[in-house]
Image (cartoon, rainbow, N blue to C red):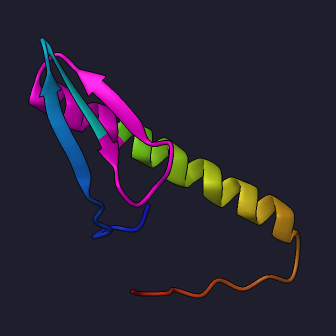
Amino acid sequence: MNAGSTFTAVIKQDGPWWIGWIEEIPGVNSQGETREELIANLRSALEEAVDMNREEALAFAHDGYSEERIAL
């Protein structure tokens, strides 16, 4: 993941658990027994998702591709 990339975590406590989702990346969610554990788990899940998406994109691109940064 690019240094400085930021994402938004939507988090809430649900009974004894903290649960959360990353707004910008569908399917990235997690839980934890504490807020801190949840944030660490979300960070790990987000890193995995971004790495997997990158690997998939590069596999489809094969050779002769370029990369372009796009900011919102």
> Which residue is more in the foreground, 13 or 35?
13
Count of numbered marks: 0
The single residue placed furthest to the top in the displayed view is: 16
From the top left corner, tell me how far across and down residue 37 is, in percent. Answer: 18, 26
From the top left corner, tell me how far across and down residue 10 is, in percent. Answer: 23, 47
Which residue lies at the image location 33% right of the left edge and 43% below the top edge? 21
With 70 as the anchor, is 53 left or right in this view?
Answer: right
Decide whether residue 23 is among the magenta residues: yes
Snapshot quadrant of residue 8 = bottom left
With 68 as the anchor, is 25 left or right in this view?
Answer: left
> Which residue is more in the foreground, 17 or 32?
17
With 27 as the anchor, is 15 left or right in this view?
Answer: left
The single residue placed furthest to the right in the displayed view is: 63
From the top left corner, tell me how far across and down residue 29 is, in percent. Answer: 39, 37
Decide whether residue 16 is among the magenta residues: no
> Which residue is more in the foreground, 55 or 33?
33
Which residue lies at the image location 75% right of the left edge and 64% below the top edge? 58
Which residue lies at the image location 73% right of the left edge and 63% below the top edge? 57
Snapshot quadrant of residue 60 = bottom right
Which residue lies at the image location 44% right of the left edge and 60% below the top edge? 1
Q: Give the range drawn in magenta.
A: 21-43
Can you say whether 43 is above or below 55 in the image? above
Quarter of the image with the C terminus in it: bottom left
From the top left corner, tell me how far across and down residue 3 is, in percent. Answer: 33, 67
Snapshot quadrant of residue 30 = top left
